Image: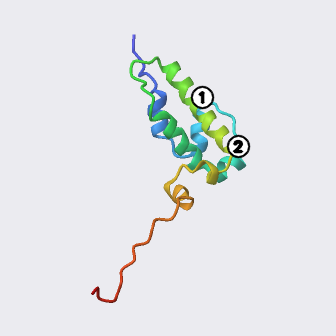
């Protein structure tokens, strides 16, 4: 009896995904292509932020898949209810609303 190689786990499949749409398809999360087209990087970044605190070691494959699906759905929902500027997942957007840093004044006249 020949054994067939097992299919790669969902985390391996996601690591090879080449588009946001592939993430949604692999995880079975419904999405509006117009929304994903505009906010794909923001959604995937937020998903990564959520998954950063997860520990999947020893978890059954179906539990890992379900958790990843839930996290992607939550990240997508974040941007349906808000905007990239309000969510600020990227440094450039965080810096856009940061209070200005105090300027250092250097006098060009000699001190007496």
Furthest toward the front, the residue is 112
Q: Residue 45 shows which numbered tag?
A: none
Does 82 sit left or right of 41 as displayed?
right
Please give the name of the residue rendered at 39% of the width and 22% of the height, measured from the top-left corner.
57
Give above or below for 4 relative to 52. Answer: above
Front residue of this view, candidates 64 and 26: 64
Specify the farthest residue to the top: 1
Assign the C terminus to one quadrant of the image. Answer: bottom left
Instruction: Provide residue 94's location: percent of width, then percent of height.
Output: 53, 55
Q: Kindly state the secondary structure of the residue where label 2 is placed.
A: helix
Dot 2: few (<14), some (14–19), or many (≥20) neighbours within 10 Å?
A: some
At which x and y percent is residue 39? 63, 50
91 is higher (above) or lower (below) than 62: below
The residue under the point 43% across, 24% down is 56
**Horizontal arrangement in the rendering, residue 24 relative to residue 100 (left or right):** right
Residue that mark 1 sits on: 70
Image x and y of residue 104, in percent: 39, 73
The residue that label 2 is drawn on is 80
Q: Quadrant of residue 44?
A: top right
Q: Quadrant of residue 5?
A: top left
The one of 109 and 14 positioned closer to us in this rendering: 109
Q: Residue at x 56, y 23 (%)?
A: 66
Mark closest to the chain's N terminus, 2 or 1: 1
Report the quarter where the N terminus lies.
top left
């Amino acid at each position: 009896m020949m054994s067939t190689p097992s299919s790669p786990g969902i985390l391996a499949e996601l690591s090879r995904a080449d588009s946001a749409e592939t993430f949604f398809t692999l995880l079975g999360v419904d999405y509006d292509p117009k929304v994903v087209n505009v906010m794909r990087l923001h959604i995937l970044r937020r998903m990564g932020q959520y998954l950063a605190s997860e520990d999947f070691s020893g978890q059954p494959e179906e539990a890992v898949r379900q958790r990843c699906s839930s996290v992607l759905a939550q990240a997508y929902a974040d941007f349906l209810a808000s905007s990239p500027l309000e969510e600020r997942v990227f440094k450039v957007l965080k810096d856009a609303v940061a209070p200005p840093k105090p300027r250092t004044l250097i006098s060009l006249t000699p001190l007496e």
